[in-house]
Amino acid sequence: MAKPISLNAKLTWKTRKAAKENFQIMLAKYKNGDTVDAEDRQDLAALLVHYDASVHPGEKTKAGVGIAYFMRKSNADIGWPSDSFHVFRTDGSSTDFSYIHAVNSSPIVES
């Protein structure tokens, strides 16, 4: 059964597969070392809000203290043969993230 995903009023897909295809196309439009443009930055920020909602309290989030910008980079230096988006935070730190894992994440619902 298809699982819809909605990041905000603008970013809604009928299936997670369609959302992943959207971010795959986005990643492909940049070369390694390219900074993501303003429109794509907003979409990636919304994706990280979705992803970070699945992180247990006390664990590190991908957005951290705030997002400065996103960049496409190689992951070869951390042992992966793939390229991905990296988030650069306002405190100067950065980390990679998988748009696939982010789309597939499910926010924690506290009872």
Image (tube, rainbow, N blue to C red):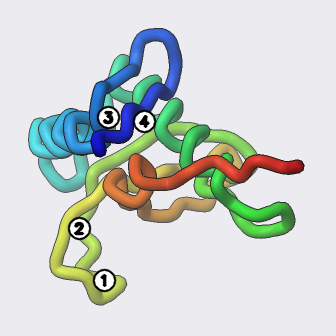
Q: Is residue 28 visible?
A: yes
4 or 1: mark nearer the eye: 4
Q: Confirm or deny contact between disc 2 and disc 4 (CB under 8 A).
A: no
Q: Is 35 left, or right, of 27 in this rendering? A: right
Alpha carbon separation for disc pair 3 and 2: 14 Å
Q: Horizontal and vertical percent for residue 92?
A: 63, 55
Residue underneath mark 2: 74
**Closer to the N terminus: mark 2 or mark 4?**
4
In percent of the image, x 56 and y 40: which residue is there? Answer: 50
3 or 4: mark nearer the eye: 4
Residue underneath mark 1: 77
Residue underneath mark 4: 44
- Numbered disc 4: secondary structure: helix
- Give the amino acid at mark 1: Asp
User: How many discs mark residues in the rendered view?
Assistant: 4
- Give the amino acid at mark 3: Val
**Closer to the N terminus: mark 1 or mark 3?**
3
Q: Confirm or deny contact between disc 3 and disc 2 (CB under 8 A).
A: no
Alpha carbon separation for disc pair 1 and 3: 21 Å
Q: Confirm or deny contact between disc 1 and disc 2 (CB under 8 A).
A: yes
**Closer to the N terminus: mark 3 or mark 2?**
3
Q: Horizontal and vertical percent for residue 13?
A: 31, 25
Alpha carbon separation for disc pair 2 and 4: 18 Å
Alpha carbon separation for disc pair 1 and 2: 7 Å
Q: Confirm or deny contact between disc 4 and disc 1 (CB under 8 A).
A: no
- Give the amino acid at mark 2: Ser
Give the quadrant of the N terminus.
Answer: top left
- Numbered disc 3: secondary structure: loop
Q: Confirm or deny contact between disc 1 and disc 3 (CB under 8 A).
A: no
